[in-house]
Image: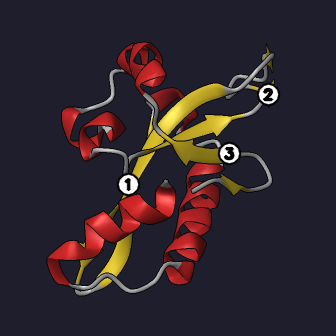
């Protein structure tokens, strides 16, 4: 699953992201690599950073995953502290909510397996 919004790009988490995730001090419960192919990373594809500095290349700024709650996909989002309160949380949350509405409904315990198949 890939999501492009005005300022962000959300994509599947890859093992190659481990070093950058460690640099963000991602809490264990938000580590996208422990969700067996279902975790996502939130990137900021260039432009200016939270303090107005110029950025070249995509910056990994957060993580996301979909969990089944009340038989619906519920996005769970985490942004690194430096990227909070700069107007990106709402944008990321809206993008994930839009994607959640487009996913097929999860069916019982198989919901996460369905999501992994869609993401592949």
Q: Which mark is residue 9?
A: 3
With respect to residue 104, does 113 lie above or below? above
Q: Residue at x 78, y 16 (%)?
A: 53
Q: Quadrant of the N terminus?
A: bottom right
In the image, 82 versus 110, the foreground residue is 110
Mark 1 Cα-neighbour bin, 10 Å: few <14, some 14–19, many ≥20: many
Distance between the alpha carbons at the discs numbered 2 and 3: 10 Å
Distance between the alpha carbons at the discs numbered 2 and 1: 23 Å
Residue 119 image offset from top left, x and y in percent: 49, 57
Mark 2 Cα-neighbour bin, 10 Å: few <14, some 14–19, many ≥20: some
Judging by the rendered image, the residue that carries numbered circle 1 is 65
With respect to residue 108, does 42 lie above or below? above
Left-right relation of 68 to 17: left
> Marks 2 and 1: which is nearer the front?
1
Task: Choose top left, top right, bottom left or bottom right for residue 59.
Answer: top right
| Label 1 SS | strand
Scheme of colours in the image: secondary structure
Total numbered labels placed on residues in the image: 3
Q: Earlier in the sequence, mark 2 or mark 1?
A: 2
> Marks 2 and 3: which is nearer the front?
3
Residue 81 image offset from top left, x and y in percent: 45, 31
Judging by the rendered image, the residue that carries numbered circle 2 is 46
């Amino acid at each position: 699953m890939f999501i492009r919004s005005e300022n962000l790009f959300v994509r599947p988490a890859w093992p190659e992201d481990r070093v950058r995730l460690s640099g963000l001090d991602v809490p264990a419960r938000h580590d996208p690599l422990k969700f067996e192919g279902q975790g996502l990373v939130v990137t900021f594809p260039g432009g200016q950073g939270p303090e107005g500095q110029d950025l070249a290349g995509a910056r990994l700024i957060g993580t996301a995953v979909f969990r089944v709650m009340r038989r619906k996909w519920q996005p769970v989002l985490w942004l690194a502290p430096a990227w909070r309160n700069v107007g990106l949380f709402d944008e990321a949350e809206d993008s994930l909510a839009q994607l959640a509405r487009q996913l097929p409904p999860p069916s019982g315990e198989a919901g996460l397996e369905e999501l992994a198949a869609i993401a592949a």
